[in-house]
Image (spheres, coloured by chain):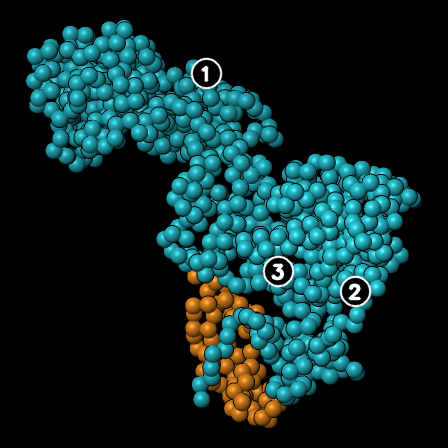
Amino acid sequence: MEKDQRIAWEVKCIQEEPPACTATCPLHLDVRQFMREISKGDLEAAYQVMKKHMPFPGILGRICTHPCETKCRRGEVGEALAIGGLERLCVEKHGSPDPVKPLPRKNKQVAVLGGDVAGLVAAHDLRKKGLAVTLFEPGQILGNTFRKFPETMLPPDVIDEEIAVLEGMRVEIRLGDPLDQAVFDRLCHEYDAIFIDRGSFVCSALALEKDDQGEIALEPASGATSVEGVFAGGCDGDAPIMLAAAGRKGALSIERFLQKAHMTIGREYDGPYETRLYTNLEGIEPLDRVSPVRPDFGYTPDHAALEAERCIQCECMECVKVCQYLAHYKKYPRKYIREIFNNEKVLMGAAHTTNQFINSCTDCGLCSHVCPNDLSMGEICRQERHFMLQEKFMPPSAHEFPLQDMAVSTGDDFALCRHQPGKDQSAYLYFPSCMLCATAPGEVLTSYEYLCENLSGGVGVLLGCCGVPAYWSGREELFRETLEGIRKQWQDMGKPQMITACCTCQTLFKEHLPEIPVTPLWQASPIEAIAARRREGAKQPIAVVDPCVSRNDAKIQTEVRAILTGLGYVLEELPLSKDMAECCGYGGLVFNANQQLDDAIVARRAAESERDFLAYCAMCRDKFVAAGKRTAHLIELLFPTTPGNDPWARGWLSWSDRRTNRSRVKQELLTRLGEAEERTMEPYEKIKLYIQPEVLRSIDNRRILENDLRQVIALAEQTGHRLFNKERKCYRANLKLGNTTFWVDYMAEKDGFRVLKAYCHRMIITGVEK
Amino acid sequence: MIQQEEADKWVCDECEKPLVMRKVGFAYMKGTFHVDLPVCTGCGMVLITEELATGKMAEVERILEDK
């Protein structure tokens, strides 16, 4: 991930943008934090939050016109929060100024001309930045604007007490000195920078460029005047909070000027601005304002807490709300992007947990679907997986097993491309997909037969893998090779219309092989007829599981529902379906890279409906069934071959079953073509195994195949290299196959062997001390 | 990791010798380390239990994969 790319992605994630109230506040008060403290009943802490951003909080907290409330999102579901009223309560309870802490002093001198709101705030902020400040006020009174408020609202002693803070901060205050051009010229010479409070005194006499209204002309971003080092701000008649913001801006500009920093970059966030934060208000119950019992006395702490509890605590988190993976790691994309970047560029893959995080995204696209800026974690993780491979810090365990399984689908045991038996051309080419052949071999064969009978022009068949495991795992070269193979076979078959029975293949071909016309099996015209024929008897209500890859294909989702309704089923929708469809965990190969998270996802989803599930993705079917959820695949409804014709009766399949089933489809097709030949078997393949169902499940969960067990046993039987357990009278043998060492406990039984347990590890035994 | 008591239940079928504790070297990704495990004194076959493979070894594999 390059830096530019990182920034481009980070900008899309707006979770860290401030809420509208904070962005609208000229001083950017952290209203969310403020509300959290009040709702906890901690007014002191809430006051500290105010003080962090607000100079003279005792004054501004009483008279602020609270523009924040106009943008409060609570106002769209009920009434806006009483931010102003709550601020007043805090300053009344805790608003006495803190004792001033000693501040460092840099050797730069700044003069502030004019002691109204902007000048006072500028002096305050500049001094806090460590600069020596002299405040010149030609009149005798500081803070004129403040003194125009009714005493009941803003008592004069509060004003004096708050302004006295400046003296404690060692701001030098000079009252009553005339400020004419000669004095101004001298100050320009004596001080490193000057801030002019335009609201405090008549400055038209000064030799500075003026605007149309006769006020000192300002560069909008920084408040710079026509004289270098002289800044100004504030405008007579503005609300005090805006005057305060002008003073703050002047202080910031002077700091930048003295540091010789850029004067205008990033200044759009100085005063009020529009936030990019998105907050979804759907499902938030409307609530009216909690008013003080006696309005003239303001809020009591109890009522204030109730009012503050209404705060929505605006945030985005749209993707995290719908993605168990993003929620599992407890952050949000902006943070994840930074972690991935640091893992790659700073730690070279050594950040604990980041590698597994990158391999745990299903690439289902739901995050970008709900993101206001279409940010896709799938795209980020896929690219990063590719990078990890190149840099050789991709853990081999993450994708090895599914890639080996893909090699089975593209290898001799499964891959096949033929015209329809008895034909020498193909108008159609059936691509049932490797995973559906693995799940429902009988149904695939029956559906092929049905297509051959009902479509004219010849229906060829193409068995193989679309290459999606390579795509998900970041193996770009293998993915391109696989696609190229499919393109070539399609061309050799005379460029027929492709019919797929897998949404993943369908989506992948559309995107990466756009020249191939693809129709889903469910939309092939004869299917409608078969659906009508199978409508019989009363059917139970079922819940439809849309595969994540169907997200952008409303047509197929509608079509599948129409077929199911046609078959007589009453349909129930899951909480997230259609364009919000979730992944079953097969996507992105997460089922292998992060089994724990995968199990949690499937278990949660299986519990979302009491109804039996109906899937139209083979992996969805198999994964839910493995979690104990009754799930059938659409093809099992249309072409049932299971016992008693109950499409839900098939049950769990092991990875070994899946390989056998694929091989069976190929062998049967070859038989129909008259090309059947005895498959040469390795001697170990003929070993008969006896395995208890629960042992088989545990072995399968460890991604151990029955043929792995056979190879271990065959070698142990041949060499005698094994351990013997004197109590249980069984053998324990091991064998390293590829990167994995397999261990099997077994004993002879009848014409074969009983497998008692099997496990594996990837660590290599390098030697034994003599 | 593996107690002698467990090792005593096993005998090497090939060498017919009991298993004794020896230092066994392991490597995975960029990590190498040694662990005391029961080993046949004849052929050097190591005993690894299910508990060890799916517990400590799997845990160390995961840690090394994220390094």
The chain holding disc 3 is A
Q: Colour of chain B?
A: orange
**Camera-side residue of A351 and B51:** A351
Which residue position is annotated with label 1? Answer: A295
Q: Amino acid at mark 2?
A: Gln
Count of numbered circles on the image: 3
> Disc 2 is attached to a residue of which chain?
A
Query: How far apart are labels 1 and 2 at the CA level?
Result: 85 Å
Q: Residue at x 40, y 19 (%)?
A: A66
Residue at x 55% of width, y 50% of height:
A361
Reading the image, the residue beneath label 2 is: A667
- Mark seen at residue A100: none
Q: CA distance from mark 3 to mark 2?
A: 23 Å
**Could you tell which of marks 1 and 3 lies nearer the N-terminus?**
1
Mark 2 neighbour class, 10 Å CA radius: few under 14, some 14 to 19, many 20 or more: many
* Left-right relation of A281 to A768: right
Q: Which chain is cyan?
A: A
Q: Is residue A508 left or right of residue A378?
A: right
Q: Is residue A663 left or right of residue A671?
A: left
Category of crowding for the residue at label 3, using alpha-carbon neighbours closer than 10 angstroms: few (below 14), some (14–19), many (at least 20): many
Q: Which numbered disc, 3 or 2, marks the residue that appears first in the sequence?
A: 3
Q: Secondary structure at mark 1?
A: helix
Residue corresponding to mark 3: A402
Is disc 1 in the same subunit as disc 2? yes
Q: Position of residue A139 (x, y in %)?
A: 16, 10
Disc 3 marks a residue whose amino acid type is Pro
